[in-house]
Amino acid sequence: MKKLLSLLLVITLLLSLAGCGKNSEGGQASSSTKKDQQEDITIRFALWDYENSGLQPLIERYEAENEGIKIDVLDISAKEYGDKLAIMLAGGETIDTFFCKTISDLGGYVTKEQIDPLDTYIEADKIDTVPYGATMDTVNIDDKIYGLPYRKDFWLLFYNKNMFDKHGIDYPTKDMTWDDYREVAKQLTSGEGPTKEYGTYIHTWASVYFLQGLQKNMGDLVSGDYVMLKDGLELLKGIQLEDKSAQDYATNKSMGSHYAGMMEKGNVGMLYMGTWQMSQFAKMKSQGISDEQYNWSVAPMPTWTKDEAEATIGGVSPMLLSTTSKHKEETWEFIKFVSGEEGAKHLADLLIMPAFINEAVMDRFVQNEYFPEDGKIALETEHIFMEWPSDKLSPLLSKMVDEEIQLVVTGNKSIDDAIADMESRRDEIIEQNK
């Protein structure tokens, strides 16, 4: 009997020890231990110019509110973003989500099956897409939604109140036509040499020269008639080369002039540029630049006739879900946060125009202490046409149109010849890419 009791005691002890071993090494730990052993999920997020994006506080907040989720930011310079991202995606590098810099690139990502449609996620979470307005149309390809718009930008007329006051000229209004714009530019121009003040600045991007054509609502630059560009090219050539109320294209190009720098010097009266410029001017104010040094405001873009509804061009930056993502549910939650109302309020605080707009977001935007009191009307522009549609030919056509416009504004080709060549070169591109 004594031997039997000793044997039972040994067996009990061995079972106890075996159980302990299994708990620590065999995956049957208590729930609290199991939680401690879970690895963090890292979401890899590609974007451009992270430092200047203002996104860091938003991402830090998301990580703080979502235990176990880490955001690995892949920061790429704006200049290299498109090419570098394309190489990484083609190479199969794991990227969970990324910003689409220009909507013309979206079709390429879809064709190459590098992004997932978001319809099922949107339906499952009952996302209200109304606050995104027409920007949702830009991410709809073949009746599927590829991306949630994060921010949108459209072009406005920035002006320096100090120069208008100096010359006793009324500030631009929504009734300003392109003829008015040219005349005001002449009136604001004075002086010579390094101290010369220019009525306006016309940047070197092709979009600066084709905006006036797209305002006519005669179609986009993939399928529309390029003759729509003629009036705008004649207008801008006249301002730069005849009136000399703006520096010419060749000078701007050779100097590598930056549009913001030209305005900030205080010797340019008007600049038409995207809404992204507001955050830069707001930053100047926050750094102590007084109204006496530089006092800016915004108005809608000039139109071709006074009774014409305001129209401008713009673009959308959607946030996309990569097909290579290994954490799609978690990435979707992050996309919802950044591109939803919380992200929009954060952008409004920075005077960056979000794609998600409701009354609360808009109030927050216009009540920003650095937004000009008389600038709200510029945000109510009725028609915003996309610079380039989400078409697979957009990148090729964009390069071609840019080349032809450069020939025009440097005096190396007539406007009529350039338009005729654009038409024929477009036909060639379409034929080669059937």
Image: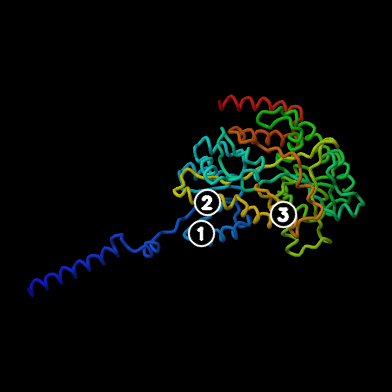
Three-letter code for the amino acid on which mark 2 is drawn: Glu
Report how far apart the C-alphas of labels 3 and 1 lie in the structure.
27 Å
Residue type, label 1: Asn
Query: Residue 239: x and y, percent?
Result: 83, 40
Q: 108 or 129: which is nearer to us?
A: 129
Quadrant where the C terminus sits is top right
Q: How crowded is mark 2: few (under 14 residues within 10 Å), some or many (20 or more)?
A: few
Q: Earlier in the sequence, mark 2 or mark 1?
A: 1
Task: Categorize mark 1 by other alpha carbons within 10 Å: few (<14), some (14-19), many (20+).
Answer: few
In the image, farthest residue toward the bottom: 2
Measuring from the top left, give residue 170's x and y in whole percent: 90, 49
In the picture, the quarter occupied by the N terminus is bottom left
Q: Which of 381 and 170 is in front in this view?
A: 381
Q: Are marks 2 and 1 in contact (CB under 8 Å)?
A: yes
Reading the image, the residue beneath label 1 is 66
Image-based side of 413 in relation to 61, left or right: right
| Residue that lies at the very extreme toward the right in this rendered image | 168
Tell me which corner region of the image, top left, top right, bottom left or bottom right, holds residue 388.
top right
Measured from the top left, where is residue 121 in percent x and y? 52, 44
Q: Which mark is residue 333?
A: 2
Q: Name the residue under label 3.
A: 365
